[in-house]
Image (spheres, grey):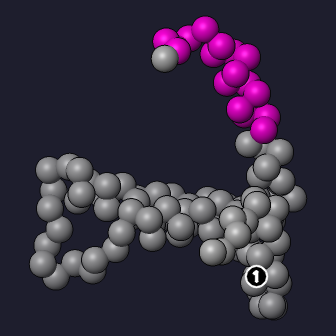
Amino acid sequence: MEQEKTMQQMQKEVDDYIGQFKEGYFSPLAMLARFTEELGELAREVNHYYGEKPKKETEAENTIEQEMGDLLFVLICLANSLQIDLSTAHDEVLHKFKTRDAHRWTRG
């Protein structure tokens, strides 16, 4: 059974991968454009599976999981290039939701 990776491990893994190329990370603006492109691909897949627009027979069979993986990779690249620790970012946003929205939703 494979052990789950931490966000820090994933960020290091991506950094090691990108670090082997002279070009390194793309600019933040280029990565944001790439992120938007990948988000569109995810939206397309979700629409095919859950929306009213079925795939054409000639379209490649991508999965929602694959598209989420692509999106995560680009997000990690962007975070790494800006020296942002995604675990810290996660903790900060979760704290914000737990305090700001503490009484917003009905608990089960």
Q: Position of residue 43 (x, y in %)?
A: 36, 55
Nearer-the-camera pick, 58 or 61: 61
Nearer-the-camera pick, 103 or 78: 103
Q: Which residue occupies the extreme top position in the image?
A: 103
Tell me the residue at 74%/75% (across/down): 14
Residue 64 visible to an observer of this rendering: yes
Tell me the residue at 80%/90% (across/down): 20
The secondary structure type at the circle numbered 1 is: helix
96 magenta-colored: yes
The residue carrying mark 1 is 18
**Magenta segment boundaries in residue numbering:** 91-107
Give the side of residue 49 with respect to residue 77, left or right: left
Tell me the residue at 56%/11% (across/down): 104
Number of marks drawn: 1
Give the side of residue 44 with respect to residue 101, left or right: left
Tell me the residue at 49%/17% (across/down): 108
Q: Position of residue 54 (x, y in %)?
A: 14, 62
Nearer-the-camera pick, 40 or 76: 76
Q: Position of residue 44 (x, y in %)?
A: 31, 60
Q: Identify the image quadrant of residue 1.
A: bottom right
101 magenta-colored: yes
Where 19 sits versus 63, above or below? below
Residue 24 visible to an observer of this rendering: no
Where 24 sits versus 22, above or below? above
Q: Position of residue 21 (x, y in %)?
A: 78, 90
Q: Identify the image quadrant of residue 90.
A: top right
Under mark 1, the amino acid is Ile
**Dot 1, how many residues are within 10 Å of its Cα: few (below 14), some (14-19), or many (20+)?**
some
